[in-house]
Image (cartoon, rainbow, N blue to C red):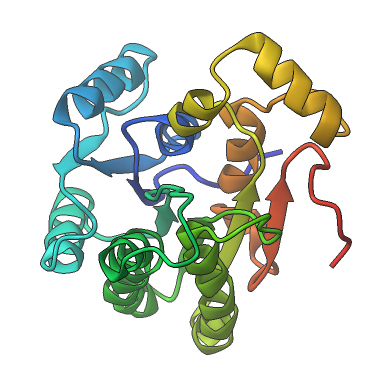
Amino acid sequence: MDLKLEGKRCLVTGASRGIGECAAEMLAAEGCDVTVVARREDLLNALADRIEGAGHKRPHIIVADVTANDAPDTIREAACKAMGGIDVLVNSAGGSRPTKWDAPEEEWIEGMTLNFTALRRLTTGIVPVMQKNKYGRIINITGSVEPKAVNIANAAKSAVHAWAKGLSRIVGPDAITINSISPGRIKTEQIIKRHPTEEDQAAFSKENIPLGYFGEPEDLVCLIVFLASPVARYITGELFHVDGGMKYFAH
């Protein structure tokens, strides 16, 4: 299938590792002009070298912390200067932080800022660029909707789901779609830290994942690439689970 992504201008946050890194590679392979954002410049440069070495256009690099007060303006302006606009935004920056239910307020502020507020502020800053072009694709990488205990990231990412659904109603007339993807156990830097051995992964998979194994970033990013494309024009306001069947409930 031709996804019609050639020349689309894509901005990917959290691109130094894991899902964001893979998204940048796969979008570049589809012929997109890609800008990558993360704090670790060395990893972004290594990613750019790898993409260019594979014969694709070298991505533009923005070294930034998405939680910084000036991040939305800085990132938007740098990306627009590099690519001439933004057609696709992949919000992949974030992190899970299990904590006590009565965690100090500063932990809640940090977790909500990283996993909801920063994403919302950056997207809000970029939507007018997409509205002007009458085209846009926004894809949010979120998290579980079935928390087993209090987790700040669960609360923040649930906020993303509700916010994105509401925003889809507003930006739809401008041919902008916004969707969220909830990963299961995808082999990323954060997940491997929690399940460092093959034995641990196998035991967890046997107990919790019907397909029986942890996913690779590519297993999720193929959906990002599709949702980023013009082909996915009639899909918006949705939450997709890529988890090997780990989610228990049908809603």
Q: Can residue 46 be seen from the camera position used here?
A: yes
Kindly identify the residue that appears in the image at 15 percent across and 48 percent down: 64
**In this picture, residue 201 sits left or right of residue 244:** left
Residue 20 position within the rendered picture, expressed as x and y whole percent measured from the top left: 42, 39
| Residue 29 visible (yes or no) | no
Q: Is residue 217 left or right of residue 58?
A: right
The residue located at (19%, 32%) in the rendering is 40
Query: Which quadrant of the structure image shows residue 215?
Result: top right
Return the residue nearer the eye: 224 or 200. 200
Q: In this view, does 233 lie above or below 149?
A: below
Q: In the rendered view of the protein, which quadrant contains the C terminus?
A: bottom right
From what the image shows, is residue 218 above or below residue 20? above
Quarter of the image with the N terminus is top right
Indicate left or right for 110 with 112 as reference. left
Placement of 4 over or under 131, stated as above or below: above
Residue 7 placement (x, y as % from top left): 39, 45
Q: Nearer the viewer, residue 130 or 218?
A: 218
Residue occupying the point 56% across, 85% down: 166
Q: Where is residue 60 in the image (x, y as percent from the top left)?
A: 21, 38
Residue 211 rendering spot, x and y as whole percentages: 86, 29
Q: Report the residue at 24% width, 41% height from top.
A: 38
Which of these two is toward me, 106 or 93? 106
